[in-house]
Image (tube, rainbow, N blue to C red):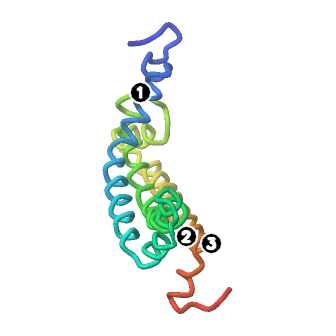
Amino acid sequence: MLVKNGTSNTSSSSAGVSTSCAALALWLAGLYIRRIRSALLEEAGKNYVLGARTLGLSERTVLWKYIMPNALMTLLPMLGITMGNIMGGSAVIETIFGWRGMGQLMTTAILARDYQLMQAYVLWGAGVFVAANFVADVLTLWLDPRRLQAKGARQL
């Protein structure tokens, strides 16, 4: 439904923003929830958690100080990898909800067979994907330097 100024009701209202954001993020939520659950269960069975419980620490302290930081370290590389899914999904979401963005620009370029624009979009998307993975890897190594030493790399 169009408003007098030519914008879509769905894209200009806060309900449209929240609906499109939910549609873009909700399909990845199951993947992240499953990954977090398996990482938490794996970390909860390790010896250092048993040692922390033996010391008499509360379950809240054990969860937030011992289990959670190590379990969440497995999500950083996953965030970088799913950036490509988010960029691809944005084209669909922008087309459905009538947003003007890079995804709709790519959809328009495909329909118009504008190969130069498609190549530029793919190059831009590849650059964003590589940058997101690089940032995720650097953050992983910065937050947990043991990973760098475990791979046998030289000390920086």
Camera-nearest label, 1 or 2: 2
Distance of label 2 from label 3 (alpha carbons): 5 Å
Q: Is residue 116 above or below residue 20?
A: below
* Type of amino acid at the residue the image marks with label 2: Thr
C-alpha gap between disc 1 and disc 2: 37 Å
| Residue occupying the point 39% across, 40% down | 24
Label 3 vs label 1: CA separation? 40 Å
Considering only order in the chain, which callout, 1 or 3, is on the residue closer to the N terminus? 1
**Helix, strand or loop at disc 3?**
helix
Residue 156: percent from left, percent from top: 68, 85
Please provide percent x and percent y for residue 7: 49, 17
Residue identified by numbered label 1: 98
Q: Residues within 10 Å of mark 2 (few under 14, many from 20)?
A: many
Q: Residue at x 46, y 51 (%)?
A: 116
Name the mark on residue 140: 2
For disc 3, the marked residue is 142
The x and y percentages for residue 65 are 55, 63
